[in-house]
Image (cartoon, rainbow, N blue to C red):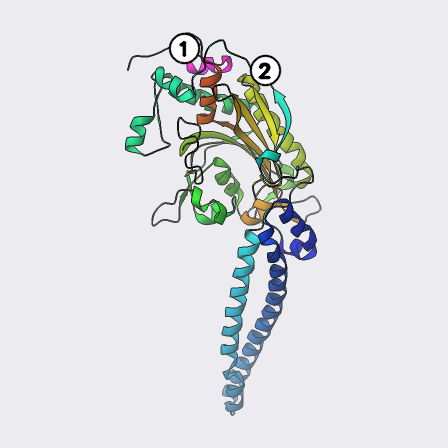
């Protein structure tokens, strides 16, 4: 979240940021937050003074009692103070909740480099990698192709779990694990700390990573528990240093998280219903960094290079897309997506996102560091996908299918899968 003092001192900048993000309905919030904050300070002062006065008079009454003197005047004087304190507390708590709700739902300040635009049509291509090959045969959709090799069963999954679930079968299970192991080995060599987090988080921990009201419809809630299934390891790793102060000498802290991801995919009804591109459950390796503000740009470039190198190694054609202001998530100050080529659809599709979140998440999670001048400051956080298995498998199935109906395994994955070619297996 944004620092309320920053909002108070930079109202024009915050309003301009809302315009860039096409969230003009929130512009009035800025003045409401500032007014509420100023009023809360006044009420807090009155509250403290009333409590102090109550304590002083209480001490005086106790002293008069010990001396055997009349306390009636003092009792009259203190009589209405508890009611005043109660009214002030109620007003103060109401103001604080109203301020907190608005501040928590203001988006991060966009980086100056972010291209302006309202939707994905204004996203900017910054780089293309790998040549798009034109196969001499009709490329099948990944779902049809996988089913033809007895590697995927969506029909039975829909019977037992509903739409957007799937059974992986035979060597596709190995390919799924191969992608995870390849990404973990890659990041381990880069000295990232491997981490497998809890698959559920309580609301406080989850709220540190996301704007809860925005994502509430996309995450699964455990009934009668203060627990939610994670949508990505990013959320759990962000919570790893909640309420902590880290020594600057140990920064940056780089993590490679592996976890399943659970998502309702709300708002995606009727889109990508066939196959495993947009599903409720998949595995992913996620990169996450805690660092100082001065280290953030270097770390962002490192995360982006890592995910780019991973897909270069897989030899999948891709492009990097700089998300425009209206398409950038509220937590991020900037995001670059990696979109890979799907030949059956003849289109680039998003596989990974790399984001810088400045101190937005750290403020929510109260994660800080001790700087060299002994001043305590909020950490900066950055995250990037390394590999999402389902979407990457879908991409491999379309890019590596052969004319004879078999699937060639990307060379870097062959040692993990144990074979070079996957052919049809009898059902």
Residue 358 position (above or below residue 125): below
Q: Which residues are magenta?
A: 406-427
Do residues under tags 2 and 1 come within 8 Å of each other at their CB atoms?
A: no
User: Where residue 310 sits: x, y (%)?
Assistant: 55, 22
Residue 39 position (above or below residue 285): below
Q: Is 408 inside the magenta-drawn segment?
A: yes
| Mark number displayed over residue 131 | 2
Crowd class of label 2 (few under 14; some 14 to 19; many from 20; radius 10 Å): few
Q: Is residue 19 left or right of residue 285?
A: right
User: Where residue 103 sits: x, y (%)?
Assistant: 57, 54
Crowd class of label 1 (few under 14; some 14 to 19; many from 20; radius 10 Å): some
Element carrying mark 1: loop
Q: Label 1, on which residue? A: 406
Q: Quadrant of residue 304?
A: top right
Q: Nearer the viewer, residue 312 or 163?
A: 163
Residue 8 position (above or below residue 111): below
Q: Give me the C-alpha separation between circle 2 and circle 1.
A: 22 Å
User: Where residue 275 sits: x, y (%)?
Assistant: 40, 26
């Amino acid at each position: 979240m944004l620092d309320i003092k920053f909002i108070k001192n930079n109202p024009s900048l915050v309003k301009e940021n809302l315009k860039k993000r096409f969230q003009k309905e929130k512009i009035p919030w800025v003045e409401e937050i500032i007014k509420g904050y100023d009023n809360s300070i006044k009420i807090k002062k009155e509250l403290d003074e009333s409590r102090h006065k109550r304590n002083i008079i209480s001490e005086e009454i106790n002293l008069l009692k010990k001396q055997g003197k009349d306390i009636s005047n003092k009792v009259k004087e203190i009589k209405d103070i508890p009611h005043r304190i109660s009214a002030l507390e109620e007003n103060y708590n109401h103001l604080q909740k109203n301020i907190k709700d608005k501040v928590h739902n203001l988006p991060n300040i966009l980086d100056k480099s972010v291209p302006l635009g309202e939707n994905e049509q204004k996203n900017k291509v910054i780089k293309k990698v790998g040549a798009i090959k034109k196969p001499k045969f009709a490329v099948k959709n990944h779902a049809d192709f996988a089913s033809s090799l007895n590697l995927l069963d969506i029909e039975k999954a829909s019977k037992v779990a509903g739409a957007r679930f799937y059974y992986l079968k035979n060597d596709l299970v190995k390919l799924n694990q191969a992608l995870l192991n390849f990404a973990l080995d890659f990041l381990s060599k880069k000295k990232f700390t491997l981490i497998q987090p809890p698959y559920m988080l309580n609301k406080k921990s989850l709220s540190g990573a996301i704007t809860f009201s925005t994502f509430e419809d996309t995450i699964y809630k455990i009934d009668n528990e203060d627990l939610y299934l994670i949508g990505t390891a990013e959320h759990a790793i962000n919570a790893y240093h909640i309420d902590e102060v880290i020594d600057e000498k140990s920064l940056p802290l780089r993590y490679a998280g592996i976890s399943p991801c659970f998502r309702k995919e709300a708002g995606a009804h009727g889109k990508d219903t066939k196959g495993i591109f947009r599903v409720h459950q998949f595995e992913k390796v996620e990169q996450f960094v805690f660092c100082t503000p001065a280290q953030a740009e270097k770390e962002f470039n490192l995360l982006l290079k890592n995910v780019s190198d991973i897909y270069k190694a897989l030899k999948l054609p891709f492009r990097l897309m700089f998300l425009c202001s209206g398409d950038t998530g509220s937590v991020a100050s900037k995001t670059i997506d990696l979109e890979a080529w799907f030949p059956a659809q003849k289109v680039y599709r998003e596989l990974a996102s790399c984001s810088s979140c400045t101190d937005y998440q750290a403020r929510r999670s109260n994660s800080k560091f001790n700087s060299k001048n002994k001043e305590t400051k909020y950490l900066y956080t950055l995250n990037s996908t390394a590999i999402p298995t389902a979407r990457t498998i879908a991409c491999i199935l379309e890019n590596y299918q052969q004319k004879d109906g078999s699937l060639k395994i990307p060379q870097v994955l062959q040692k993990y899968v144990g074979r070079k070619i996957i052919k049809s297996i009898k059902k």
